[in-house]
Image (cartoon, coloured by chain):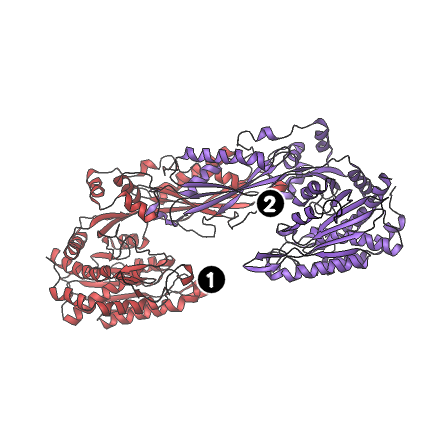
Chain colours: A purple, B red
Amino acid sequence: MSAAPKEFLEYIDAHKDAFIKRLTKAVAIKSVSGDAAYRQYVHDMGDFVESELKAVGVDTKLVPLGKQKLDGKEVELPPVVFGKLGEDKNKKTVLIYAHYDVQPALQSDGWGQDPFELKHDENDQLIGRGSTDDKGPLLGWINVLEAHKSLGIELPVNLRICFEGMEESGSVGLDDLIKAESGPGKYFDGVDCVCISDNYWLNDVTPCLTYGLRGITYFTVTISGPARDLHSGLFGGCVHEPLTDLFHLFSKLVTPEGKILIPKIKKLVDKLTPEERARYEKMDYSIEDINESVGADIAVSEDKVEILMKKMRYPSLSIHGIEGAFAEPGEKTVIPAKVSGKFSIRLVPSMTPENVNPLVKQFLEYEFLKLESKNTLKVEVTHGGKPYLADPDHWNFVAAAKATKAIYGKEPDLTREGGSIPVTLTFADALGVNVLLLPMGRGSDGAHSTNEKLDLSNYINGTKVLGTYLHEIAQATK
Amino acid sequence: MSAAPKEFLEYIDAHKDAFIKRLTKAVAIKSVSGDAAYRQYVHDMGDFVESELKAVGVDTKLVPLGKQKLDGKEVELPPVVFGKLGEDKNKKTVLIYAHYDVQPALQSDGWGQDPFELKHDENDQLIGRGSTDDKGPLLGWINVLEAHKSLGIELPVNLRICFEGMEESGSVGLDDLIKAESGPGKYFDGVDCVCISDNYWLNDVTPCLTYGLRGITYFTVTISGPARDLHSGLFGGCVHEPLTDLFHLFSKLVTPEGKILIPKIKKLVDKLTPEERARYEKMDYSIEDINESVGADIAVSEDKVEILMKKMRYPSLSIHGIEGAFAEPGEKTVIPAKVSGKFSIRLVPSMTPENVNPLVKQFLEYEFLKLESKNTLKVEVTHGGKPYLADPDHWNFVAAAKATKAIYGKEPDLTREGGSIPVTLTFADALGVNVLLLPMGRGSDGAHSTNEKLDLSNYINGTKVLGTYLHEIAQATK
């Protein structure tokens, strides 16, 4: 069934323990990119990744990205690890992306162990920070290359590697590098498709391929009144209070059921086709799945297809919080002088920050006028990115689907993600090729949470899928 | 004009420097009651106050209040300093209250100096933490007693002293002590009236006496949904979001102009009499005063009388903030799992926590039902106290008004405070006597802010007022 040689699959099974050891080593390097105090570990992790790649025959280079200001210090950005393997004009060239940095983790956050000491538990889960996000998938590729090298099997495609160390902290500098290295004579010249392994299955049992991502536009809405915080005993009732205004304003954005109330937003959403609807109907998902993943019976609909579409193909608006108001435990009787409310809208085709932002801004300004407040309003767009949609019938997806079927014995679901992975769009725009998201882990892995895990079966079978995918590409495009 | 002997007034002027020195010593003792690391200083300050009182002839005792848990440590509560001077049955007995603890202060908060080193600046302001709140007024009493003792003038009243060291941290233990010491044979037996010096003039030029305080009822409204915080990319649009519910709910509480929307609240407010209205009309206050004190042109009315009544005799509702939502700088795309919104209502006669709380609770629960959310609501009253209103025609107020007129040359305004000073009510309820609030400092003193100050003229004239007030009582009640 599989386009990959039988020896390759056997090798992966036989070297399970060595692969766990490799992941243990990687997890032990505390490559938290968001904290200046951990920056040296991120560099150490870049060195580790490079030496592992060299050892399996990859021609590597560390690309420096300059400095950044972090926690008040100027620190060196972690390098991007570039890699090249094969220059055969008769083969397809596949660019693979993963990241070697991780989210912060302290045992005191609620971990049942030292988060940087990979634990192989009795349920065959590999628990540790970065296990599933994204050290497991990254090492999956290295495992694949080790197997081919050890077995003397020629790689069926040319590989280009781009492993970054700043994904959890805004991928500072990566966009410019990708753009600079795209085009004739550049590092990514000749790339035929991209494979990103940095997301998750929809649930815990059915593999998926992801062909779409929602975009985002993030608003910071600041209402300012008095020159300083006031005591509500002294001034309550006498002045226009910024926080009261903000509650009125934000109550106009979205209904409790999630319906966005900003005019004309709905018209920007692409119409649903029967073919697309059929994909949601087919997906292995239920209302129990969502209630289980959020830990409460709070889904806005009892219809699985409705929920999947709300997650994948419709926009949503979430309020995140307020900066400047009283946020601690206890009772403070303050009238905050200046409050910044934050919300974001998830964008789907054909919404873009460009066509959405003016509608939101106009709406907020008009609704604020209606409040007749003497306070002042400032609306800022603090970040954003457009949505992504790939062609799931492209050979890149077909190869991944065949590989998945060969290893897991079932068709992967074709999903779209509710979140955004901005590098996807950067690759798609800069290279003009199909970008596939091929997840290794499960929906319950808890990527940014405490007790992040990767099931051993996903690590091993996921490694097999990655290797098989390369062989399927070669076969499909022969 | 003044009932106080001329030598007394001359003594106060002549000993200005010594009195500044006394305040300098007191400010230097960092008696911050809200921080376990400073607790020893609060005890030191209690000792200082006791020794100063002893030196001017007061029979003192330190009353221990037991222990409290603070910052995870068990610490000894600062004692209440009790004092007794005079047992003459032919004199009135006046109970005086002040506090010797202070708010926290760090130079890095924005002070132009070490906050615990009293600075006498070129504008004759005495700048330092506690200068006006409440060490200046407390020492004013000691200055008065020193003058009488040095001059050999008999005190015209019996004094009972109650100086506490926990006012800035909830007056832990004080209520019970006051109740326990009220009644026949107890420490406060025979007290005819109370004078509290712990508030401020309405503005910077006209003295005032305060005969009313608003009460408060503080609500913590918790909406819970998912078992943990969610990623808005993964779940935005799919679930009932607690923060969206909270914005809808709180937008129903009060209009941007400050009108409370909870039914039946308005009916609990006492009717305005023409006599009371005349007091507001007479007050030395303008719209410019409020705009200046808040640092912006945001008053909800252009009518001075309206604003004064909103501050003093009408209820108000202020939203203070949200616990559990994203409150830091930057952009986090979280759907908070559980949010606790906090607001409070300032109460005026005849509102009480008892008659207001059920109305608020019912309203919130009904409005939440209308949202048809699957999240859960919990409404808690986290603290409260009823409003206070004294008879401003009582001899206690008449004496204070005469004393003020004698020293400042103008009639004091009769004000009510928008905030609450809970000990006022405790004294009134426990002793059943008239309680006067006789402020020493000005509206612009910045009691809880950086660069807190007391004008030297207020310290000196205020001391004269306190002494003269005692003589006026004796004269008025002869």
Task: Report the front residue among B350 and A445.
Answer: A445
Q: Is residue B181 visible?
A: no
* Three-letter code, disc 2: Leu
Chain where mark 2 sits: B
Question: If the image is split into quadrants, where does the C terminus of chain B sit?
Answer: bottom left
Task: Report the front residue among B214 and B243.
Answer: B243
Q: Are marks 1 and 2 on the same chain?
A: yes
Residue B311 falls in image quadrant = top left
* Three-letter code, disc 1: Asp
At horizontal 31% and vertical 65% (from top left) the residue drawn is: B119
Left or right: A332 with respect to B194? right
Percent x, y for residue A180?
69, 48
Q: Is residue A193 above or below residue B148?
A: above
- Residue receiving disc 1: B71
Query: In the drawing, what numbered circle is on residue B230?
Result: 2
Chain where mark 1 sits: B
